[in-house]
Image (cartoon, rainbow, N blue to C red):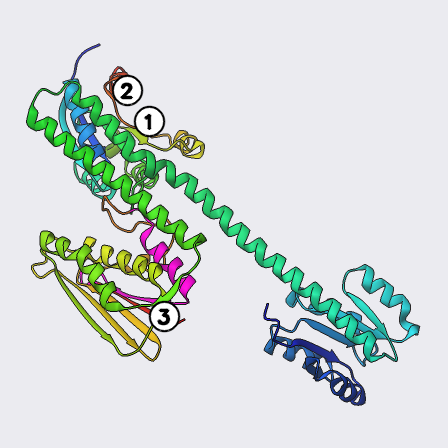
Amino acid sequence: MSENKLNFIVIDDSKLDCFIADKIIQNTGRAESIKVFQQATEALSYINTTPSSATTIVFVDIQMPVMNGFEFVESFEKLPDNLKGNYHIYMLSSSINENDIAKVKGYSSVKHFLNKPLTNDTITAVLEAF
Amino acid sequence: MDSNRKIKVLYIDDEPNNLVSFKASFRFDYTVFIANNTQEALSRLEEEPDISVVLSDQKMPGVTGVEFFEDIQTKYPNPVRILITGYTDIDSVINAINRGHVFRYIKKPWTQADVKSAIDEAHKFYVTSTLLAMKNDELQKAYDELDKFAYSATHDMRGPILSVLGIIDLTKNAEDITEIKEMVSMMENAMLKLDNYIQNLHDHYSIRRGELNITDIDFDNVIKDMSDLYDITGKIKNINFTKSLQQNCKFRSDDISIKIILNNLLSNAFKYQRKDNADKSVFLNVKVDNATTVITVEDNGIGIPDKNLNNVYTMFFRGANDEIGSGFGLYNVKDALGKIGGKIELQSTENEGTKFTVTIPSK
């Protein structure tokens, strides 16, 4: 597997969890860039205005105020294809709610549901695909 | 149900003499409403929603008593229906009873004892069935809340724990002492957040299940307690905290409920400030007059968007991207106000500020 560099976007209302994700991603040594957003709306407008030519992995928390993870994905899916092509979305949650997990499977743009906290092992498994 | 209040009874008959004698016979036992025809009866039912027993004569021009009962069954399902009729209509009576339209029937000519026992039985039935409906509503509400709670609790209680576990995982490989110190203070914040959540949860259940403890409220003390809590926050965050009190008479209420209300409103006022505002302010004003307390908590913070104004009291609703909101605060305020018979009003403009006005009657 080639160790190509990747872009990352982290969306989580918890500052602490953003910090954890940031560190874990840095530790992989695969990060070209890491963007951290505490508000899903800001992440969405970033994606909307920044043409991305490189593969970008998005970690988005499910339970957030104002715009939650599901709403984010729904808005993301409405973006034009040329904008969203390079984004790979993973949803994160502390929830053990079956409905949430089942709901994640319903979104075609979401690759996987991951349990919090993000650890070295989970991120290694995720990055194997890239 | 208030036992001192008289049972409200509606009697419908096309024969004015019957109406007069009915009213004369029962006016001491019940609050009697009479109607000469079904049209009039409908207006009475509309005006007096807590009529518990309706008696109707069967033979009336245009519409029979049974038909009338069938008509009102959907719109006024609660009042218990009693039919008054002669022997000749026995078939329609049996039919009506079997179809559930009529609770009892009284044969003509009636005796006062017959009617009284029928009304009393009907009223008992009314009380039990409305009570049951009320209890069912409450139960449904409790179930809904429990569902929501179970969902939110996994997130709000596990969240901080998982964050700390994540940090612990990171510290295993961290070498730099400054970085480790930073991580420890982050863990501290996560634990404070969890503690705050559990505190709110405790408030919530003490409001729910707790008995009220009505005492004289000395607002000097209440405001002093709030000053102890918030003067420091104000200093640290550079927010002016202005308090004013005018207590002209005694006021009795539940001390804990009042403190929960004030604490939550103030906590929000201090939390939702605009970062770029040079003159951050919170005003607390308490006025006790005429056995009523009016409390206003006002800030010049971020305000609440119009579309959220109706949701702010909903459990677990969070309108802002802040880290510490639990979605419990205003829900607890509303709950506490419900217990002590108070009201809350909200005025807010985005980017200008929010003002809550709480009105509480003395107990």
Q: Amino acid at mark 3?
A: Arg
Task: Tell me what residue is drawn at x 25 percent, y 41 percent.
Answer: B193
Q: Residue at x 30, y 72 (%)?
A: B294
Chain letter of disc 2?
A
Q: Is residue B202 left or right of residue B61?
A: left
Residue extending farthest front: B215
Residue placed under numbered mark 1 in the picture: A115
Are the residues tagged 3 and 1 within 8 Å (C-beta)?
A: no
Q: Which mark is residue B324?
A: none
Observer-side mark, 3 or 2, equals: 3
Quadrant in which the C terminus of chain B is drawn: bottom left
Outermost residue on the top side: it is A1
Q: CA distance from mark 3 to mark 1?
A: 51 Å
Task: Answer with mark 1 or mark 2, whichever residue precedes in sequence.
Answer: 1
Residue B61 lies, in percent from the top left, at: 81, 81
Q: Is A62 positioned to the left or the right of A50 in the image? A: right
Which residue is the site of mark 2? Answer: A122
B19 to A6, vertically: above or below: below
Q: In this orientation, which residue lies closer to the viewer: B357 or A98?
A: B357
Q: Is residue B48 depicted above or below B153 in this figure?
A: below
Residue lying at 22% horizontally and 22% vertically, measured from the top left:
B169
Span shown in magenta: B326-353
Marks 1/2: CA distance?
Answer: 9 Å
Q: Secondary structure at mark 2?
A: helix
Q: Please report, as a chain letter, where disc 1 is located.
A: A
Secondary element at tag 1: strand
Evaluate if marks 1 and 2 touch, with contact meaning CB atoms under 8 Å apart. Answer: yes
Q: Nearer the viewer, residue B272 or B180?
A: B180
Per the image, the residue denoted by label 3 is: B252
